[in-house]
Image (cartoon, helix red, strand yellow):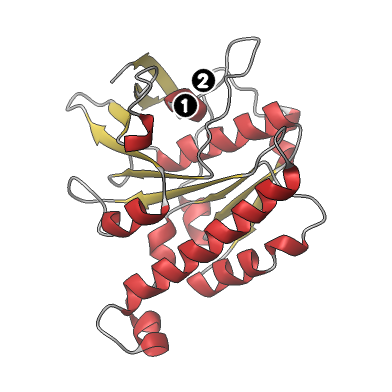
Amino acid sequence: MVHRFFSCTGATPQPAENADITLVSGPPCCGKTSLLFQFAMNRAKESGRGAVFICRKGRLENSPPFLSQGVDPSHSVLQRIHIKYIEDDEGIRKYFAAFHLLGSFPAAVIIDDFADFFSERSCQQRYGNARARDLAVVRVLALCQNAIAHANKKLGALESCNLLLSDVHQGDTPRSMFIYKRWISSIYTIQGDGHGSYILKSISSSDCGSREGRAAKYSIALQYLVLEHISNG
């Protein structure tokens, strides 16, 4: 549900989605990092556990996330969001290869701009074929899926660990959508409305049984993430 990406203003947190892996895809400069950061805050707040935010150091420093309107920058929950700087797909592989060794699992792992970690050149050098980058993406997604499934099995029915990825698309859909649909059950896309706001919408077939809260209109105003309204898509 799209409410997961915005500040929880109600007294009772909304229930978590069943999806272990979620993708948010949108055009450049549409507030994806801010949505992901708010998702991390919500998961840390409702679970009482930490969240891991994986990104490139330079990109986060140049384009830090905006907090939701009304969120106190000194809120204690921010201390439970652990920023992990990784520069390439090898770093992601190493992190998830050792995931099962963690003493405790985070409530969420966020990977901002997932596809950008996969350099065409380095993938070609590693695999040596025309679809080397796609192969690298598939292998990392398979590793991520296994790691998150292991964590959720260990956590049991009362707790969960979610993986949230973001990607950039220049047209209607990201380049690797055909791969994402194979590995990811919950997918959201972002499109501009032509008036300075954006529409975040679920396109997942797994959500077809429930129309509640499938789309949200939001904007970035005065360096805040501002939710305008949520609809049934």
Point 68% across, 27% down: residue: 46
For the question of whether residue 88 can be seen, the reply is no
Is disc 1 surrounded by few (<14), some (14 to 19) or many (20+) residues within 10 Å? some
Point 26% across, 53% down: residue: 174
Amino acid at the residue labelled 1: Tyr
For the question of whether residue 36 can be seen, the reply is yes
Q: Where residue 141 sits in the image (x, y, percent)?
A: 47, 62
Which sits earlier in the primary sequence, circle 1 or circle 2? 2
What's the mark number on residue 69?
A: 2
Callout 1 touching callout 2 (CB < 8 Å): yes
What's the mark number on residue 9?
A: none
Furthest residue toward top: 11
Secondary structure beneath disc 1? Answer: strand
Furthest residue toward right: 103
Image-quadrant location for residue 67: top right
Per the image, the residue denoted by label 1 is: 224
Point 50% across, 34% down: residue: 66
The image shows residue 150, relative to residue 190, as above or below, that is below
Judge left or right: residue 33 versus residue 152.
Answer: left
Q: Nearer the viewer, residue 68 or 204?
A: 204
Judge left or right: residue 180 versus residue 84.
Answer: left
Q: Where residue 54 sits in the image (x, y, percent)?
A: 57, 55
Amino acid at the residue labelled 2: Gln
Q: Where residue 103 sits in the image (x, y, percent)?
A: 82, 55
Q: Nearer the viewer, residue 215 or 17?
A: 17
Give the Cα distance between marks 1 and 2: 5 Å
Q: Where residue 20 sits in the image (x, y, percent)?
A: 54, 44
Image-quadrant location for residue 90: bottom right
Secondary structure beneath disc 2? Answer: loop
Judge left or right: residue 153 versus residue 102.
Answer: left
